[in-house]
Amino acid sequence: MVMAGCVTNPVAHTTPATIDDGANASRVFQMAGSDCEEAGWIAHYSGSPTFAGVWQADDIREEYNNPVQDSMYLPTPLVNPLYGNHHIGFNCKTAVVDGVEMQNYQWGFVGEQIKAPAWDPGGAERHILIGGISFQNGTIADALRATTTADITHTLSAFTEWTIPRDQPRSFAYSEYHDQEKGVYQSWSNLEKYRDVPERTVRFWWQVPADGSQAHIWSMDHDHDGADQPENLKWNPVYWDMHSTGGGQWVSPKDRVGAQEHNFDINPTAAEHFPWFSQPCIHTFYEHETLTFTSGRVFTDVVLDELWAH
């Protein structure tokens, strides 16, 4: 099935993303995290675009408490859907893969919330099209990279500092997600408790070269169009699932916005130095009592003509 913006066959053959451990066995990558935090910023805009002719943006209003203005300072009428560029980091107090435990393990992604594609096998409540995903160096990152030809980059930091604690009125936080290859993403804002998120599965979609070759950083440049990809390269969809047992969610107040900064400097702006100019954004923070991150499948007979990059 060759895709150029339409689905010709919604039933797709898949290949599991597995680890070959050299003992005549294959096993799926799975990371178990406990006492995890997820935080970052979303640049949000009115509309419902299609990415790379295939991936349909999903309306993010309900996920983030229906903000009343977008990242262009424009009002967001109730009838208009919103889509958003996500820049999100995770920090788990403990993370375990195959009995190997790491403390304060950090990872993150950039991407867009999307509707489930036609070839989706079901089982997830939320879908994210990623333009990059990174993991902190070590055994866990090595095990993940062994399961995929996607270019898993390197997390340097992912954390949130509360200037005013989240159980206090007008709580205030600074969140940072730093990908060595893609830059540092920072956000500052008041945050207020929005809801308790129920147990759910979030599915992360990406694309890998259909010829089986290794993807490289050119597939993840922050230019939104993959301009540096090799000519005539085709792509297969691939996914990973994050299952969370749920927890609280905090969001910047709907009638205000957070401030964000993205740069490619080695060192981020100091947390206490609020940027003098910033595009407004949604700033969000989630608690996850436990989560699991599991490799899914490569859809080998879904062939995409274009790569979406962020």
Image (tube, helix red, strand yellow):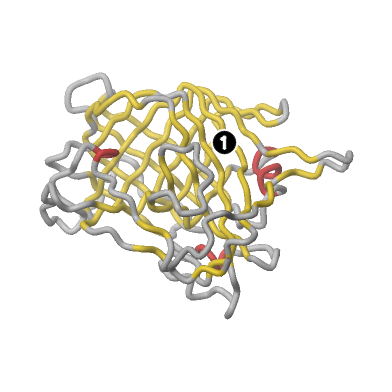
Compared with 275, 220 (above or below) is below
244 or 304: which is nearer to us? 304
Q: Residue placed at 44% from the left, 60% from the top?
A: 264
Number of marks in the rendered image: 1
* 266 horizontally vs 102: left or right: left
Task: Give the residue drawn at x 42%, y 59%.
Answer: 55
In the picture, measured across the screen, residue 39 lies left or right of residue 296, that is left
Residue that label 1 marks = 293
SS category of the residue bearing label 1: strand
Identity, as a three-letter code, of the amino acid under mark 1: Phe
> Residue at image x 60%, y 37%?
294
Residue 136, compared with residue 276, is above or below; it is: above
State the quadrant of the C terminus. Answer: bottom left
**Which residue of the protein is positioned furthest toward the right in this rendering?**
23
Nearest the eye: 74 or 125? 125
- Location of residue 226 in the rendering, given as x and y in whole percent from the top left corner: 48, 70
User: Picture coordinates of residue 235 (x, y %)?
Assistant: 58, 66
Local crowd at mark 1 within 10 Å, few (<14), some, or many (≥20)?
Answer: many
Q: Which residue appears farthest toward the top when viewing the image?
A: 167
In the rendered image, residue 75, in percent from the top left (x then y), is placed at: 10, 53
Q: In which quarter of the image is the N terminus?
A: bottom right
Give percent across and percent down for residue 295. 62, 42
